[in-house]
Structure formats: structure tokens, C-alpha cells
Image (cartoon, rainbow, N blue to C red):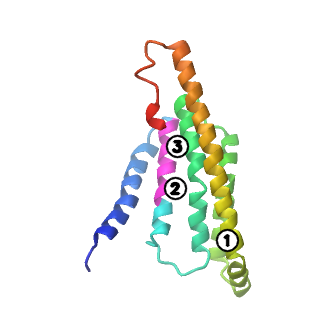
Amino acid sequence: MDITTIDFLRVLLIVIPLIFAIITITEKQTPKRILGVLLIVISCYFIIYFSLIDVYNPSVPYIHSAFLISIMPLLFLYTKSLVNIVFIWKKKYLFHLTPGILVLTFSLLFLILNNDLLNKWLANSTIAYYSFVLTTYILQVIIYSILIFRLIINHKKNLKNNFSIYYHKNNLNWLK
């Protein structure tokens, strides 16, 4: 079996985030744990995207989109945990992950409850579903990007006001 460069890059896109996820999720600091979850979600997205899980079922693409629409909320929560010194995980933050959790739940139900009626429904609603997911994802990218930039701008203002000596070292420009 010949391994091509594309296959090698696919494996790297999955393995590298998983390695970092394993390293970061075992840490006690909340930002590192959120980063670990984010990296696991990205790895799962790539695993399904590159069809490394070879399951013939119409609901597999739905699982793929569940991970896709979970990336921006996790990125927002990671940024929030970085810029907020006293960040403590609260149950209310799960609200940000609701769309991804709902899509994943329904996808797993479709995968488990594989019957003819369900397959007909999936076949007839694929375009509507993907337009919903695409709209949700675009809205998430726009809204969460604005929220993330607001967090960074407020953090920069706080650094300037409270720690003007340390501002140049800790300005988080790398998040832009």
C-alpha cells in the first residue's frame, strides 16, 4: 500500500491536534482544558471530513457538521478564558455549544436508529439541512468573531489602564 503525500498530510491534520489535545486536556488550568476540547473537536472534524471513519450511513455527514458548528463557540470560550484572569467554567457556557450538541445528538440517533423511514427523511431533507448548517456556521463565524475581537480589545484596554509597564509583553496580538 503506497502512502501519498495527501494521505500523509491528512494523518498529520488529525494526529497533531490529538497529541496537543491529550497534553493540554490533562492540565488543571481551564484555558488549557478548553483548548484540549477544541483540538479534539477539530480532530474529529478532520477524521470525518477525510472519511477515515468508513461508515456507510447517510447520517455521517450530519455528524461532520456537528463538529464544524462547535469550533467557533469553543474558540470564543478559549479566548474568554485567556483574557479573564478569574475565569471559572459555568454551566451557562454550555449554551454556546447547544447547536453542536443538538446536531450531534440527532446525528447519533439517526446513526443508531437506521430504518427505511429515517433514510427517506434524510434523503429528502439533505439540502434543507445543509443550508441550515451553512447559515448557522456563517452566522457563528460573524458573531463569534465580533465577540472575540471585543474580548481582545477590552483586554488590551485593561492592560493599558492597569499594567502599562507590562502591556508590550502581554498584548495578545497573536490572537488576531
Which three-letter amino acid code belongs to the residue tagged 1? Leu
Asked whether, in this view, residue 105 is left or right of residue 15, the answer is right
Quarter location, residue 10 = bottom left
Q: Disc number at residue 34?
A: 3
Q: Does residue 50 sit above or below 123 in this rendering?
A: above
Among numbered discs 1 and 3, the one appearing first in the sequence: 3
Q: In the depicted view, which residue is nearer to us: 67 or 143?
A: 143
Q: Which residues are magenta?
A: 30-43
Mark 1, residues whose alpha carbon is within 10 Å: few (<14), some, or many (≥20)? few
Residue topped by disc 1 = 109
Question: Residue 62, how many percent across, how many down?
Answer: 61, 69
Q: Residue furthest bottom?
A: 116
Q: Secondary structure at mark 1?
A: helix
Q: Residue at x 43, y 49 (%)?
A: 21
Which three-letter amino acid code belongs to the residue tagged 3? Ile
Main secondary-structure element of the magenta-colored stretch = helix
Question: Residue 81, how many percent across, how many down?
Answer: 55, 34
Residue 26 within the segment the image draws in magenta: no
Mark 2 and mark 1 in contact? Answer it, CB < 8 Å: no
Q: Does residue 107 sit above or below 93 in this rendering?
A: below
Number of numbered discs present?
A: 3
Q: CA distance from mark 2 to mark 1?
A: 19 Å
Residue topped by disc 2 = 41
Q: In the depicted view, which residue is nearer to us: 6 or 108?
A: 6
